[in-house]
Amino acid sequence: MNIAKYELLTNTDATLFRFKSKGINGEIDKGIVYKPTKNDTIYNLGFGDLVFDQIQKEFIINDLIVSDNGDRNKILATVAESAYIFSERYPERKIFFKGSTKSRTRLYRIAISLNLRELSKTFHIFGTIEDENGNIFNVPFDSNGDFYGFIIKRK
């Protein structure tokens, strides 16, 4: 993607990433994590502000904070870059992600739509929908779709 990105720091197995958002509210530590789901071929992408949990005495990723640091596109491009790195290392794994709110999921759909041509060169892209019984299904991505979340897999 031809959008500026932040420098990513990662662990040795490319499942944890850190970077600093730099904007109107200063520097904010961000984290990205790839965790296995019940299906061992699908990994959940979690993303948000890194905050220190006083009870657990460790850093956690809070995906509900609204930072409003004025660098949304650069942040999304950086998260996308982590997906390129993760999927290059583990091409057999699928990546699932959704927003912590409906509006964030919509933002992700818009970001995918705006970059669909480039993303499609590397990834198969699916939307996930939820039926009335809570079952989740993958369907081909559609820029106008109302999705529960998204799944990408390296081609």
Image (cartoon, rainbow, N blue to C red):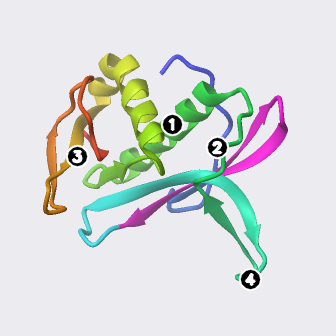
Q: Position of residue 44 (x, y in %)?
A: 39, 58
User: How far is disc 3 from disc 2 in space, using C-alphas?
Assistant: 28 Å
Q: Quadrant of the C terminus?
A: top left
- Type of amino acid under label 4: Ile
Q: Secondary structure at mark 2?
A: loop
Q: Which residue is mark 2?
A: 8
Seen from the viewer's position, the closer of residues 78 and 113 is: 113
> Label 2: how many residues lie within 10 Å, few (<14), some (14-19) or many (20+)?
some
Residue 55: numbered disc: 4
Q: Is residue 3 left or right of residue 43?
A: right
Query: Which of disc 4 and disc 3 is earlier in sequence?
Result: 4
Q: Tags 2 and 4 in contact by the CB under 8 Å rule?
A: no
Label 1 sits on residue:
81
Tag 3 and tag 4, C-beta contact below 8 Å: no
Is residue 28 found left or right of 26 in the rendered image?
Answer: left
- Look at label 3 and name its amino acid: Thr
**Whole-percent x, y for residue 110 in the image:** 40, 25
- Which amino acid, mark 1? Glu
What residue sits right under mark 3 in the picture?
128
Magenta stretch in the rendered image:
18-36
Does residue 32 appear in the picture of this structure? yes
Q: Earlier in the sequence, mark 3 or mark 2?
A: 2
